[in-house]
Image (cartoon, rainbow, N blue to C red):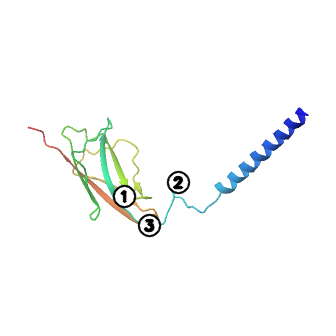
């Protein structure tokens, strides 16, 4: 009696596992939601802008004096970094509109030491049709008296 019960239980468990795996395969193969080359969802949003910009040092602390000024109409970001900041080892961070993405990708510390040639980043809309290139201008804070 117990052996028959255990045999039926194993069969029942196998059937449930099969149904779960078949359901997973069915829903994971759906192509209703297109994705881009980065595996990010492509949406119908055409908005394309930067909400805010942050800049941290290698110690993960902010190096911006006050806050950065983001001008979306002219695609310019201006920030003053604290006196003594190592401009060769900074980590930029952008807040973007929903579903947008940034190029180039930020993968680690970035060298901002060439103030004559500011860094540029392109924001790409959720529908991947609108692109806006932002220029980041940094100014080093003057030595305190």
Query: Is the Cβ of the residue at disc 1 closer than 8 Å to that at disc 2?
Result: no
Near mark 3 (Cα within 10 A), the count class, few <14, some 14-19 or many ≥20, is few
Q: How far apart are marks 1 and 3 (CA)?
A: 12 Å
Q: How far apart are marks 2 and 3 (CA)?
A: 17 Å
Q: Which residue lies furthest to the top in this view?
A: 2
Kindly indicate the quadrant of the structure image that contains residue 120: bottom left
Left or right, residue 58 beside residue 28: left
Q: Position of residue 1 (x, y in %)?
A: 91, 34
Identify the residue at horizontal 35%, vertical 41% (top origin). 109
Q: Where is residue 125 in the image (x, y as percent from the top left)?
A: 42, 62
Identify the residue at horizontal 88%, vertical 32% (top origin). 2
Comes first in the chain, label 1 or label 3? 1
Q: Which residue lies furthest to the front in this view?
A: 1
Q: Nearer the viewer, residue 132 or 42?
A: 42
Comes first in the chain, label 2 or label 3? 2
Q: Nearer the viewer, residue 136 or 51?
A: 51
Residue 122 is marked as: 1
60 w.r.t. 39: above or below = above
Q: Distance between the residues labelled 1 and 2?
A: 18 Å
Comes first in the chain, label 1 or label 2? 2
Label 1, secondary structure: give it.
strand
Provide the residue designation for mark 3: 129
Can residue 117 be seen from the camera position used here? no
Q: Residue furthest right?
A: 1
Residue 60 is marked as: none
Kindly indicate the quadrant of the structure image that contains residue 8: top right
Can residue 93 be seen from the camera position used here? yes
Q: Residue furthest left?
A: 145
Near mark 2 (Cα within 10 A), the count class, few <14, some 14-19 or many ≥20, is few
Provide the residue designation for mark 2: 39
């Amino acid at each position: 009696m117990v052996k028959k019960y255990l045999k039926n239980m194993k069969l029942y468990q196998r059937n449930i596992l099969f149904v779960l795996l078949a359901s997973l395969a069915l829903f994971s193969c759906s192509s209703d939601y297109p994705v881009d080359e980065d595996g990010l969802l492509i949406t119908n949003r055409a908005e394309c802008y930067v909400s805010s910009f942050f800049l941290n040092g290698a110690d993960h602390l902010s190096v911006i004096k006050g806050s950065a000024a983001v001008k979306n109409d002219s695609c310019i970001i201006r920030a003053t970094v604290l006196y003594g900041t190592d401009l060769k080892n900074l980590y930029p961070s952008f807040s973007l509109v929903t579903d947008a993405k940034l190029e180039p990708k930020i993968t680690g510390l970035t060298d901002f030491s060439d103030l004559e040639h500011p860094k540029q980043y392109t924001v790409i809309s959720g529908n991947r049709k609108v692109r806006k290139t932002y220029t980041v201008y940094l100014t080093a804070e003057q030595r305190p008296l």
